[in-house]
Image (cartoon, rainbow, N blue to C red):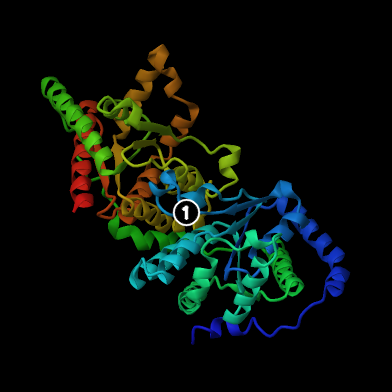
């Protein structure tokens, strides 16, 4: 397919006069407002992405949507060059921060397609890098859609002659000349390159099953009607019929993972260490960690530590020993509990993306995104389709981190059932530790075997070399604490070598 053929079908449409549009406006506007009211109670957000050539009407279309819709349910996001804070995180970070909540509409200009397109057109990135970025975007959109988001992508198009005429028209009027953004004429001079790169975007999106609506940008009222009808129809369809993601049956899932299970049973949990050796190694590791953190800051490398394990396994104690070796100004501990009302209304990864560290800093998650495949799976808070696809989503999430000069170090601290019981009973005897033991802890203990299966699956399916799981024998707290902090040092040293090469 030629570069132009992706856009030819959008051209040649009849011009709709203002009078004809106004005759339809009242009914269409009422339909959209009513659909927006229905959306408020829905368990999914709507995301409208606008892209295309300069002067084709993207901004005018966004203004119309904001004028027609209830502003309490719409947010508009337009992106410029990443600032210093954004440059220190993965490219998706600023888009994850701006995800709309369920029942809300987010409108996006110059979003996740803009920079890859401009880099490719101006040849500041290779074709291989451009295509890789499109794959990352497809994964991002798939993750959003798989978890419920309604994605509407609108590409506003003009041919080269019409774009020139449009830019000249805007530039000649003092009231509209501001609409010709810096670089618009430079982009027009590279029109053929834009068509070539845009065609790759069209092709990639179509192959991923999320094609663009290509709209003829020449005629104001014609293009508005096409976009407004598209939004109306998409909302109607989605509100009438929710997606029905398929999940493997329990039997099929067990068969898929059966050969990889049993890793926890092979652990020798009663590892021991003498008190004197423990103190010496812990002190040495903390000094080493302090030095590594400062080297990481100079190198622009961030670090994320993930702590998971059974209740009373010693996550908190291990974290406290780690932070004693860190500069207090350069780390943050994020305790993860049940999602708040705001968090529950967003994609489950939203709250974790928001806490990503900037360069040189350390973020420690006391429990993490793996709750989806652990407690949410075992307790039935996530349906089978949701927790099954989460393995891929979490691998992709961590890949984005490691690609962005971030060390991801994940710990599962394992204790046996008898040791857990001993710790539970000990906590009940000490007044200032009684808050650590809850009825939920006792209920979780009754599902020990189900959690073992879930952990085995988690380790088997989310254990890449770039972000491996470290299984920690936790019956002896001194042993587990030393192993954790020494492992953090080893992985930070490895990361410094990797990112400096």
Give the labeled residue for mark 1: 81
Direction from residue 23 to residue 283 in the image, left or right:
left
Where residue 56 appears, as percent x and y from the top left, is 63, 71
Q: Dot 1: few (<14), some (14–19), or many (≥20) neighbours within 10 Å?
A: few
Quadrant in which the C terminus is drawn? bottom left
Q: Is residue 479 visible?
A: no
Residue drawn at the location 34% of the way across and 70% of the way down:
126
State whether residue 23 is above or below residue 11: above
Which picture quadrant has residue 355? top left
Residue drawn at the location 36% of the way across and 49% of the way down:
453
Outermost top residue? 431
State whether residue 172 is above or below residue 466: below
Where residue 77 appears, as percent x and y from the top left, is 59, 52
Where residue 262 appears, as percent x and y from the top left, is 28, 50
Label total for image: 1
Residue drawn at the location 76% of the way across and 72% of the way down:
221
State whether residue 19 is above or below residue 474: below
Where residue 8 appears, as percent x and y from the top left, is 60, 85
Residue drawn at the location 71% of the way across and 59% of the way down:
175
Which picture quadrant has residue 285? top left
Direction from residue 268 to residue 29 in the image, left or right:
right
Residue nearest the observer in this picture, 86 or 174: 174
Direction from residue 422 to residue 103 in the image, left or right:
right
Q: Is residue 93 visible?
A: yes
Classify mark 1: helix, strand or loop: loop
Residue nearest the observer in this picture, 215 or 267: 215
């Amino acid at each position: 397919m030629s570069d132009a053929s992706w856009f030819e079908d959008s051209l040649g449409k009849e011009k709709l006069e203002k009078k004809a549009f106004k005759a339809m406006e009242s009914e269409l506007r009422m339909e959209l407002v009513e659909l927006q009211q229905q959306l408020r109670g829905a368990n999914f957000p709507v995301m409208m992405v606008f892209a295309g050539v300069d002067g084709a009407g993207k901004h005018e279309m966004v203004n119309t949507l904001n004028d027609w819709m209830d502003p309490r349910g719409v947010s508009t996001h337009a992106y410029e060059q990443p600032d210093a804070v954004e440059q220190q995180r993965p490219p998706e970070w600023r888009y994850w921060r701006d995800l709309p909540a369920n029942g809300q509409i987010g409108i996006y200009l110059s979003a996740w397609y803009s920079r890859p397109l401009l880099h490719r057109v101006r040849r500041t990135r290779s074709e291989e890098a451009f295509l890789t970025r499109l794959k990352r975007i497809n994964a991002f959109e798939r993750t959003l859609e798989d978890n419920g988001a309604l994605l509407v992508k609108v590409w506003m198009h003009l041919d080269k002659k019409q774009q020139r005429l449009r830019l000249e028209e805007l530039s000649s009027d003092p009231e509209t000349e501001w609409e010709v953004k810096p670089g618009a004429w430079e982009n027009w001079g590279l029109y053929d390159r834009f068509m070539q790169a845009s065609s790759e975007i069209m092709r990639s999106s179509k192959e991923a099953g999320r094609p663009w609506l290509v709209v003829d940008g020449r005629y104001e009222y014609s293009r508005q009607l096409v976009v407004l009808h598209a939004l109306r129809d998409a909302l109607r369809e989605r509100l009438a019929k929710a997606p029905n993601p398929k999940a493997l049956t329990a039997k099929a899932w067990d068969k898929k993972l059966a050969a990889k299970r049993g890793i926890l049973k092979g652990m020798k949990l009663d590892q021991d260490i003498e008190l004197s050796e423990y103190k010496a190694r812990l002190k040495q590791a903390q000094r080493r960690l302090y030095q590594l953190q400062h080297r990481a800051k100079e190198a622009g490398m961030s670090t994320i530590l993930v702590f998971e394990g059974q209740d009373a396994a010693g996550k908190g104690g291990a974290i406290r020993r780690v932070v004693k070796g860190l500069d207090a100004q350069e780390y943050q501990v994020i305790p993860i509990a049940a999602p708040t009302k705001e968090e529950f209304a967003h994609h489950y990864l939203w709250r974790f993306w928001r806490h990503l560290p900037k360069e040189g800093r350390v973020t420690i998650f006391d429990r993490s995104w793996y709750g989806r495949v652990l407690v949410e799976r075992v307790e039935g808070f996530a349906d089978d389709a949701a927790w099954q696809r989460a393995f891929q989503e979490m691998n992709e999430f961590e890949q984005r981190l490691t690609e962005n000069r971030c060390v991801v170090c994940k710990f599962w601290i394992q204790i046996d059932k008898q040791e857990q019981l001993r710790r539970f009973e000990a906590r009940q005897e000490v007044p200032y530790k009684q808050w650590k033991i809850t009825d939920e802890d006792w209920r979780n203990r009754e599902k020990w075997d189900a959690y073992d299966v879930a952990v085995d699956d988690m380790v088997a399916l989310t254990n890449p070399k770039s972000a491996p799981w470290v299984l920690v024998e936790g019956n002896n707290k001194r042993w587990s604490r030393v192993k954790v902090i020494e492992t953090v040092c080893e992985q930070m040293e490895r990361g410094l070598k990797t990112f400096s090469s």
